[in-house]
Amino acid sequence: MKENQECLTAYAFRGSIIVLRDNHPKVSQAEALFEKYGRMKKRVWLRRVKNLNRHYLETGIWGSYDTAGIVESELDGTPVALFEDTKLKEEPDGICLERHMIVAGKKFAVSSVFPKDASSTPTDKLLSLIDKEQKAERNSF
């Protein structure tokens, strides 16, 4: 999530939806109503690009991580922040994230598969690799 990207919370009730910014003065009242009558609550981060079509014409990129909004989903009761153009598919032995992109007129379908019983997350592995590379650089001096 980007530090300066604004976030909204949508509270769904029977027949109506209330959408509030995180710092709105009525958030506590909306939370109380949601606890009593609510059906679903989702957090959505606002896009940073004002005109997506203009962005595509200027960059040739659609579905970019830089411009995609973030939607909070849930997996096994745990909140998971996903880019809005990503689908989460839960399989019996793993989790699959699917994303479709157009870059410079070429279509890409990207699938990432993660085992449910993994000993570490992809982020943990990436951080470990970065640490090893930095250690090797320090030792080379």
Image (cartoon, helix red, strand yellow):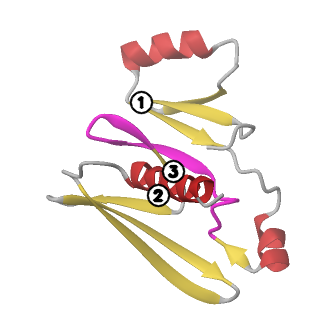
Mark 3, other Cα within 10 Å: few <14 / some 14–19 / many ≥20? few
Q: Which mark is residue 63?
A: none
35, above or below 16, in the image: above
At 82% across and 79% down in the image, what residue appears? Answer: 57
Q: Identify the mark nearer the N-term, 1 or 3.
A: 1
Horizontal side of residue 66 vs 10, given as left or right:
right
Q: Which amino acid type is marked by label 2?
A: Leu
Q: Which amino acid type is marked by label 3?
A: Asp
Expressed as whole percent of the image width and height from the top left, the position of residue 37 reads 39, 18
Expressed as whole percent of the image width and height from the top left, the position of residue 109 reads 47, 79
Residue receiving disc 1: 14
SS label for mark 3: helix
Q: Which amino acid type is marked by label 1?
A: Arg
Q: How many marks?
A: 3
Q: Identify the mark nearer the N-term, 1 or 2.
A: 1
Query: For residue 125, which quarter of the picture?
Result: bottom left
Which residue appears farthest toward the bottom when viewing the image? 106
Residue receiving disc 2: 129
CB under 8 Å between callouts 2 and 3? yes
Horizontal side of residue 118 vs 60, given as left or right:
left
Report the magenta residues as a range.
63-80
Query: For residue 13, which quarter of the picture?
Result: top left
